[in-house]
């Protein structure tokens, strides 16, 4: 995300960054507040970027994950009404499964906010 020019504000499990704050859940899925893996800001588009890491296919459709997708896709920057974007980092071997999940589970009007990042670091 830093290489893309984003300002990383918090990241789970990385030294030098604070742990992301939980995001209040107004009633999606399991109703629990959720923490992203990364929170960043894109100064070019003046919008926030929420990052999630899914290391294997089993993690894609858990109740926790489904709630996170809905919650994070509903967020917007209150200062300028810019929607947050959701970056989901997955092993290349499950990109197709994640794409299928998104097209079947997530409403079409949210698709433009979702970015799938194929990672060589996370391989099944």
Image (tube, helix red, strand yellow):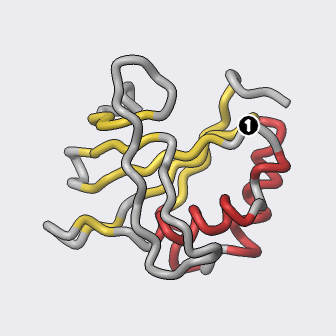
Name the quadrant containing residue 63: bottom right
Q: Furthest residue to the top?
A: 15
- Give the residue number, with chain letter if any, for mark 1: 55
Q: Position of residue 100 (x, y in %)?
A: 79, 63
Q: Is residue 6 above or below residue 52?
A: above
Q: Which residue is the extreme one toward the left?
A: 79
Q: Residue at horizontal 59%, vertical 47%?
A: 88
Point out residue 84 in the picture as x, y percentages from the top left corner: 37, 61
Quadrant in which the C terminus is drawn: top right
Q: Could one spot residue 6 in this view of the protein?
A: no
For mark 1, give the secondary structure.
Answer: loop
In the image, what residue occupies the spot 67% across and 66% down? 66
> Residue at (77%, 50%) from the top-left corner?
59
Q: Position of residue 19 (x, y in %)?
A: 40, 36
Side of 108 where 76 appears, left or right? left
**Residue at (52, 73) in percent of width and height:** 110
Q: How many marks?
A: 1
Image quarter of the N terminus: top left
- Seen in the image, is 109 located left or right of residue 118? left
Crowdedness of circle 1 by 10 Å Cα count: few (<14), some, many (20+)? some
Q: Is residue 108 above or below residue 37?
A: below
Q: Is residue 46 visible?
A: yes
Name the side, left or right, on which 29 lies relative to 7: right
């Amino acid at each position: 995300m830093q290489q893309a020019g984003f300002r990383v504000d918090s990241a789970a499990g990385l030294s030098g960054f604070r742990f992301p704050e939980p995001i209040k859940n107004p009633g999606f899925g399991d109703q629990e507040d959720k923490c992203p893996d990364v929170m960043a800001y894109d100064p070019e588009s003046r919008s926030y970027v929420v990052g999630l890491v899914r290391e294997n296919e089993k993690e894609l459709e858990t109740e926790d994950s489904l709630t996170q997708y809905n919650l994070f896709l509903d967020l917007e920057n209150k200062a300028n009404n810019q929607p947050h974007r959701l970056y989901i980092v997955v092993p290349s071997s499950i990109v197709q499964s994640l794409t299928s999940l998104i097209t079947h589970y997530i409403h079409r009007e949210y698709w433009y906010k979702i970015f799938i990042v194929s990672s060589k670091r996370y391989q099944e």
